[in-house]
Image (cartoon, coloured by chain):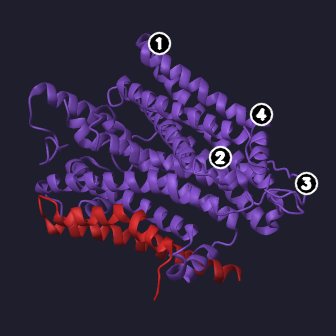
Amino acid sequence: MYTRGRPTQGWPAKSPRGYRTSFQTKTEDLLRVMTKRSGRLYLLLGFSVAVLVWFLYAWSFKLTHGEIVLGLGDWGPGGGATWGLYIGMFIWWVGIAHGGILVSAAVRLFKVRSLAPVARIAELMALIGLVCAVSGILMQLGRLDRVFTSITAVLPRAIQHSPLVWDVTVITLYFVLTGTYLLLTLRHDIYVLRQRLPPLLSPLYRLLYFGYHPEEDEKVERMVWWLALGLIILAPLLLHGGVIPWLFALLPSMPGFYGAATGPVFLSLAIVSAFGVVTVVTFVFRRVHHWQDIFPNHVFATLGKAMMFAALAVLWLQLQLNVTGLYAAPIGVARVTSAKLDSPGYWMAIGLIAVSFLYLAVQSWMPRLFSVGRTAVAGLFVVLAVLVEKTLFISEGFTHPGFQLYETGSYSPTWVEVSGVVGTIFIVILYFTVLTKVIPVVEVKVLEEK
Amino acid sequence: MYVPYVGTWLIFGIVLLPVYMVLLAWFLGKPRKLRLSFLGVGYVIGLITLLWGGLALMSLIARVLFI
């Protein structure tokens, strides 16, 4: 079992000299970042807030002027796509949110110890990834009150047959269970560090470790083990590889959305982007805070290998889709597959994933070529590639319906939608910048290890 | 006779199965500490309330301000 180590009674540790030095150094590093204020920090906060103001302006512009400013139209006589970048972004962020549970499951269920230092960052990423995903739906939907009223009004009946309601149910559960996971694991860490944390936030910390006793660690560890198991089944297999693709398959005249392989394709893209984002975020933390001892090279080597296998799965499943979609396929499927292959965006996405895969494979076999920076660049490449692929999946699916009444439509993202995507990225930057000052972003028991 | 939709089985029988598993394991698994099992359930219920309660409040404010 993955047990909590020493110390549980308080800080600093009373242990052998070498251990104490290592633990204290890493913990001091963590606490230094939590309490440090600098001009660069305020500059980043100010810039992020400015981008968020622009994001809110773009959203209010859309609310004021309506759908027309999105360049989205009816897929009938309008000859366009009813969904575009916003919904592509929704699937992209949900996929990224899986990073949290994939890393936690790797650490807790499969004992991949080298990923333990990034487990909490990944869990935090899962929470904010889901928030950003839902913001894509909110921006597409328009009136905020529609989310609550449209779901609650039909939930008791629709839960029996509507994948849209299943989607809302499972995303809610994913968010709630990940939040529970984080709250349970934070109790020990906040308690151990309580005397060194910012005094201003002490009421919050008291609430977070309310009723904590060191003897509870073993039970909590078992509880989060079961949570990791439950989440790894619920989120990747039944949400991204289940409910979301089932939902798209319901649109009967869109051959691009239909097919049994859609679930595995979604899942492969989600996994590669999830590991990609965790790699990029960890790289930024290491670079900005000089945390080479907390996030050593082997963390990136493991993330690189995970990304490599996920990228290979993406390429293999795309091959399956394209061969079955082109070779004596039904007319609608052949048309949408051809359109996808004619798109430079698709080849850019596949190219970025292929280049990342090749580099990560070479790096795995020839360790002298390993580079933390290049691994992070590969992470960035796959994340961008998945956003492009997801947006093309949505827009090409709509602009190539399975009937010939109208001409093929067209779609290109507008500044309003691009502002939405950039805004959510800065929400994540702001979130991590602030959270780093509030809670330990690395589990203390990982720092305690020799 | 009432026959449930196939979706009823799918959502309650398959998709939500991991959630039942987690809750059962919390209460029946060893070491058995009911205080912590209930704490976990409290977190789950609290977060659901926070999420959907917050959304309800936001909807109410949006209606008051814009409609």
Between the C-alphas of marks 3 and 1, the distance is 51 Å
Q: Residue at left 50%, top 76%? A: B5
Please identify the residue farthest to the front as the structure is shown: A328
- Check disc 1 and report the residue beneath it: A369
Q: Secondary structure at mark 1?
A: helix
Residue pointed to by mark 2:
A390
**Residue A404 to residue A450: above or below:** below
Report the mark closest to the observer, 3 or 4.
3
Q: Is A138 or A88 nearer to us in this picture?
A: A88
CA gap between label 2 and label 4 equals 14 Å
- Name the residue that disc number 4 marks: A344
In the rendered picture, chain A carries what hue?
purple
Which element carries disc 3, helix, strand or loop?
Answer: loop
Which amino acid, mark 1? Leu
The Cα–Cα distance between marks 2 and 3, rounded to whole angstroms, is 23 Å
**Figure quadrant of residue B17:** bottom left
Residue at far bottom of view: B1
SS label for mark 4? helix
Rendered view: A8 above or below A291: below
Does residue A183 appear left or right of residue A56 in this picture?
left
Q: Chain of mark 3?
A: A
Quadrant where the N terminus of chain A is found in the figure: top left
First reached walking from the N terminus: tag 2 or tag 1: 1
Q: Is residue A221 left or right of residue A183?
A: left
Is A409 in front, or is B64? A409
Percent position (x, y) of residue A142?
70, 68
For mark 2, name the chain.
A
Mark 2: secondary structure: helix
- In the rendered image, the vertical position of residue A166 relative to residue A323, given as above or below: below
Residue at numbered disc 3: A407
Image mark 4: chain: A
Res. A264 mark? none
